[in-house]
Amino acid sequence: MSDATAIRAAGTRAQEMIDALAAISADSDRLTRLYLTPEHKRAAELAGTWMEQAGLSVRMDAAGTMRGSLPPGRPGPSGNKSLLIGSHIDTVIDGGRYDGNLGVVVGLLAIEALKARGEALPFGIELLAFGDEEGVRYPITLTSSAVAAGVFDPAALDQSDRSGVTMREALTAFGGKPEALAGEAYQADSVLGYLEVHIEQGPVLERTGAPLGVVTAIASQSRHRIRIKGEAGHAGTVPMPMRRDALVAASELIVGIEAIARKDRKNSLVATVGEIEALPGASNVIPAEVRLSLDVRAATDEARRDAVATILSFARKTEAVRQVALTFETVLEKPVATCGPRMMAAIQEGASRVMGKPAQQLLSGAGHDGLSMAHLAEYGMMFVRCRGGISHNPAEFVTVDDMGAAVEGLVEAILALARQEAAR
Ligand code: HGY
Ligand code: MN
Ligand code: MN
């Protein structure tokens, strides 16, 4: 079991950094920090300052990711490969302060702790503060890690946000370089692997009394856009049987989607309609059009695809009964991303050493930058217990000691990798 004093000290420092980042928001009364906004830049620059103070050489890449580099402390069998450590500093709207940000803070404090202990690692470390994991401003998600992993689709640059600003325009105004994104990808043969520390955003660790856990895989996920067209009409004059009310059709569909997901017993299937817009949006006009988002996740790609197919056939029935016109567009699909054995073993060893008991393994229902980084190299994730499993909510909370345990757990995971390297 690790030294409680060191854990408390690391956790206290982490809390200060988390709070400093949380003060950087688009809104005065809640935490909202979207990709390529002035808040993103200020938070990235703060992270960059901390990285410099920790002795890393720092630069912002063309996608707005702040990168801190630590060279190897001694030669190693893997030549001069680097271990990538990171997470995201963007948030959802009215989000929690630990989602993403904790992974950057813990990564930084682990590097500081290793340096303070005089550990000379046989590989370099790259600390990455990604600017767009949530995909709240633009339809696609994981933009900045996709650039780092070399899997970014430049067509995304032409996507517009709600105010009609394209990603290309926003990136240029931010100081990024749309034309230089392809050159920002790491080369697979220069990367040892990717590690991320992240809050669990679920109730399992709290229920089992464990501060840390080991991720096995990230669930399969897809995002869809649904449009339902009915017919506008006077709210006071059109008899009920003659209406083609798009919002009533959408409501029936939403309840049906929930019922389909609730039927699942073994695939961790979840389906969420998080966004809805009714047009023209006047109280005395029968809604002519409704636009919905749909987010579907499951433990396997097959279960998710089956669920989407079931939802779509239900949507077609609703379309016919309600005499509306429905379009169903798939915006993104991310297959299950399984954690790599070497990275998992290192996380397993690190977390178990700190807790003094074997760390449990669990699936991540939430998406993470590991979905991108898995295309580049093995990835591993360490989960940190969060109160009630609450996330994407200002009530998100992690204790100081659990944050300190995460720092120690990452330190031990990195040392486990160094031992693995020495044994090769
Ligand atoms: O949506 C997700 O799973 C992640 O929080 N972006
Ligand atoms: Mn996250
Ligand atoms: Mn999130």
Image (cartoon, rainbow, N blue to C red):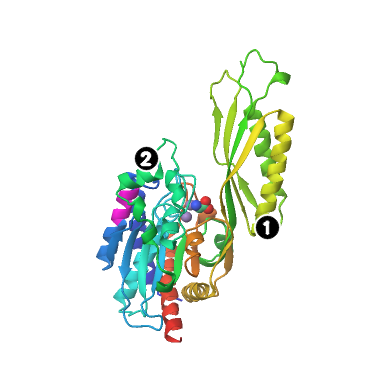
**Residue at the image point whose x is 37% and y is 77% from the top:** 123
- On whether residue 292 falls in the magenta region, the answer is no
Q: Position of residue 14 (x, y in %)?
A: 36, 61
Query: Residue 27's mark?
Result: 2
Q: Earlier in the sequence, mark 1 or mark 2?
A: 2
Q: Position of residue 19 (x, y in %)?
A: 35, 53
Position of residue 252 relative to residue 264, above or below, is: above
**Of the two numbered discs 1 and 2 in the rendering, the one whose residue sits closer to the viewer:** 1
Position of residue 383 relative to residue 170, above or below, is: below
Quickly name the residue at label 1: 302
**Residue at the image point whose x is 50% and y is 68% from the top:** 380
- On whether residue 45 falls in the magenta region, the answer is yes
Q: Which residue extends farthest bottom? A: 423
Majority secondary structure of the magenta segment? Answer: helix
Residue 329, image quadrant: top right
- The magenta span reads 40-46
Q: Position of residue 346 (x, y in %)?
A: 48, 75
**Which residue type carries mark 1?**
Glu
**Residue 416 visible in this rendered orientation of the protein:** yes
**Residue at the image point whose x is 25% and y is 64% from the top:** 53
Left or right: 303, with 81 as reference point: right
